Amino acid sequence: MKTLIIGDVQNDFIPGGSLAVPEGDAIIEVINKISGKFDLVVAIQDWHPPGHKSFASNHKGRRPFETMDLNGIPQTLWPDHCVQGTSGADFHPGLDLRPVEAIFRKGVDPETDSYSAFYDNHHLRSTGLSGYLREKGVTEVHGCGLAGDICVYYTLKDALKSGFSAVLIADAARPLDEENYKAAQSELLRNGGRILLSADLG
């Protein structure tokens, strides 16, 4: 059974948002076209409390995109984004949510960031996604969304670690940083993942 995981297609990650991914809106039409090709579709939603420690605004003298140690691991400090209950945290209105069977929220712990749809960055807090997929009989995960080099990549990386096959749909994702995205794709392939285009889905 194959599932599509749609990562963080939220207003704050779309051009004009507080943490905009270049051309982030270009993938929406692609995702809408392919979502009907899967047995199961789930969506992931960044869902931060206002005082989240990954926000530069919560560290005096720090600026967005600086790096610091946060509870023992490196943390990029971000502009405030996807704050619970705000319009920036809403899914983009152009994204067709009708095929989406379940929505999993991440980043809810104010002390720890969460890039992957499966776990927080310390791998201590599970979203429950792995168990949900296993209960549904899923064997293969296809990832798309924003940002390709961060949340989509870490989701597929954890999918492989959790025993699922993992596929990146390259034209249904956009990165925050192109060089990081190239490195992420190379690592995904080395670890047994695959990369396809939406046209390859048939």
Image: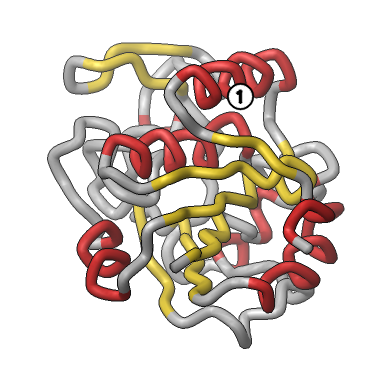
- Give the residue at x 36% y 44%: 159
From the viewer's perspective, is 88 left or right of 153? Answer: right
Q: How many other residues sit within 10 Å of disc 1, few (<14), some (14-19) or many (≥20)?
A: some
Name the residue: 19% across, 51% down: 126
In front: 47, or 25? 25
Residue lying furthest bottom: 98
Q: Secondary structure at mark 1?
A: helix
Residue 44 shows in this picture: yes
Task: From this view, report whether residue 130 is shown above or below residue 56.
Answer: below
Up/down of 201 relative to 186, above or below: below
Between 46 and 175, the one lying in front of the other is: 175
Image quadrant in which the N terminus is located: bottom left
- Corner quadrant of residue 29: bottom right
Between 46 and 135, the one lying in front of the other is 135
Residue at x 25% of width, y 65% of height: 134
- Position of residue 75 measured from the top left corner of the image (x, y, whole percent): 37, 20
From the image, tell me which residue sits under label 1: 185
Q: Position of residue 122 (x, y in %)?
A: 21, 31
Q: Quadrant of residue 93?
A: bottom right
Residue 114 can be seen in this image: no
Which is nearer the eye, 41 or 24?
41
**Residue 22, image x and y in percent?**
81, 37
Residue at x-position 68% and y-position 60%? 11
Q: How many marks?
A: 1
